[in-house]
Image: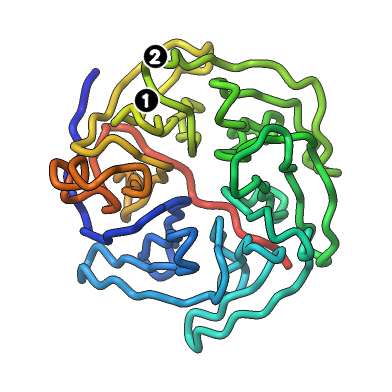
C-alpha cells in the first residue's frame, strides 16, 4: 500500500523532530533542534505555539504535569503555561561538542534520549535513561546518531535506531528495571532508500520508520516485512507519531537543514509537519512519571 501525506502546518523547521500527540490538549508537540524551540500545533485551530528553550533541544515528551525535554545540557522540564524551563538532571554538560537527539517515554514512565557529536563522528554518543526519581542512567554506548525508539505493545521489546548503521534494532526489555538485553537487527534499510531516523509503533505492533533523505515513512510488520509506504513531497522526514481523536492521523516532522538553496526552492514546505490517515491506529503516548 502506497499513501501520500499532505501538509498540516508549514512550520519551517530547520531540523524538526520528535512529534508526540497530547490527548489532553489535542496538540502535536515537536522540536526544532538547533534553534532550541519546542512547538505545539493544534490541528483543530491550526494554531502553532512556540517555546524557546535557550539551547538545542533534541526531544520532547509528555509528563504527568507539563513536558519533559532532552536538551544539550541534559534533561529539563517545560511548563507550557508559563514557558519556564528548568534543568533537572545534567548529562555531559561540559561536552559542548555533543547534543541530545531523539527520545521517548517508556511504559513505566521513564524518559529515554540519546546523544550525538555535532560533527557526527562515529561512536561519540550514548543512550541515557531518566528515571522518575530524577536519576540518570547510561543505557547504551557507543552510539553515533541516537535516534528513534519505541516499545512493543506488551512492553517486552524496545526498538532503537542508530542511524548510520542503516538498521532498526530490537532489544529484550525488562519493564521493571529498564534494562536492555539481546540486541539484534529487526530490519535493515537499503542505502538508496534513505537513513532510518525516528520511529513509532502502532496498535498492531507494526513499526513506522521515517527515512531521512528517502522522502518516505515506511510501515513494517512484526516480521520485518514492508507493509506500507507513505510518500512525502520533501526528502527529509525525521519522525512520526499517531494523533487525532481516534489516533488514526499519522503526523510526520521534516527538515530543510540538509538542503541547498536550489533544493529548498523545489521543496518549499520542507520543515513542515505532514499528515495522512493510513487506516490503522496508534497508541496513546507514554508519560514521564517524575
Residue 167: quadrant of the picture: top right
For residue 218, which numbered disc appears in the image?
1
Q: Is residue 75 above or below residue 182?
A: below
* Name of the residue lying farthest toward the bottom: 82
For residue 15, which numbered disc appears in the image?
none
Q: Is residue 148 left or right of residue 114?
A: left
Percent x, y of residue 214 = 33, 27
Under tag 1, what secondary structure?
A: strand
Q: Is residue 214 left or right of residue 114?
A: left
| Picture residue at 44% right of the left edge, 76% below the top | 51
| Picture residue at 47% right of the left edge, 51% below the top | 18
Query: Is the C-beta separation of discs 1 and 2 under 8 Å?
Result: yes
* Front position in the image: 137 or 266: 266
For residue 226, which numbered disc appears in the image?
2
Percent x, y of residue 116 = 65, 45
* Front position in the image: 60 or 154: 60
How crowded is the residue under tag 1: few (<14 C-alpha within 10 Å), some, or many (20+)?
Answer: many
| Picture residue at 39% right of the left edge, 67% below the top | 39
Amino acid at each position: 500500500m502506497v499513501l501520500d501525506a499532505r501538509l498540516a502546518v508549514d512550520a519551517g523547521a530547520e531540523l524538526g523532530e520528535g512529534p508526540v500527540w497530547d490527548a489532553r490538549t489535542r496538540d502535536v508537540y515537536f522540536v526544532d533542534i538547533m534553534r532550541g524551540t519546542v512547538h505545539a500545533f493544534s490541528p483543530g485551530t491550526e494554531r502553532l505555539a512556540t517555546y524557546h528553550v535557550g539551547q538545542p533541544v533534541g526531544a520532547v515528551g509528555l509528563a504527568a504535569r507539563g513536558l519533559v525535554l532532552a536538551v544539550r545540557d541534559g534533561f529539563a522540564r517545560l511548563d507550557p503555561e508559563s514557558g519556564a524551563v528548568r534543568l533537572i538532571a545534567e548529562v555531559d554538560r561540559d561536552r559542548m561538542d555533543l547534543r541530545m537527539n531523539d527520545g521517548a517515554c517508556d511504559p513505566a514512565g521513564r524518559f529515554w534520549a540519546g546523544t550525538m557529536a555535532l560533527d557526527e563522528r562515529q561512536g561519540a554518543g550514548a543512550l541515557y535513561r531518566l528515571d522518575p526519581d530524577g536519576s540518570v542512567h547510561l543505557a547504551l554506548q557507543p552510539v553515533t546518531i541516537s535516534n528513534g525508539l519505541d516499545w512493543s505493545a506488551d512492553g517486552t521489546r524496545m526498538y532503537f535506531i542508530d542511524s548510520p548503521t542503516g538498521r532498526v534494532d530490537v532489544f529484550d526489555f525488562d519493564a521493571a528495571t529498564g534494562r536492555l538485553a539481546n540486541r539484534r537487527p529487526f530490519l535493515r534499510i537499503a542505502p538508496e532508500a534513505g537513513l532510518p531516523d525516528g520511529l513509532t509503533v502502532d496498535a498492531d505492533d507494526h513499526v513506522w520508520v521515517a527515512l531521512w533523505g528517502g522522502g518516505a515513512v515506511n510501515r513494517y510488520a512484526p516480521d520485518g516485512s514492508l507493509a506500507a509506504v507513505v510518500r512525502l513531497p520533501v526528502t527529509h522526514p525525521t519522525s512520526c507519531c499517531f494523533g487525532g481523536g481516534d489516533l488514526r492521523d499519522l503526523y510526520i516532522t521534516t527538515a530543510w537543514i540538509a538542503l541547498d538553496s536550489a533544493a529548498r526552492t523545489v521543496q518549499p514546505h520542507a520543515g513542515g509537519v505532514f499528515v495522512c490517515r493510513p487506516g490503522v491506529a496508534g497508541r496513546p503516548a507514554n508519560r514521564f512519571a517524575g
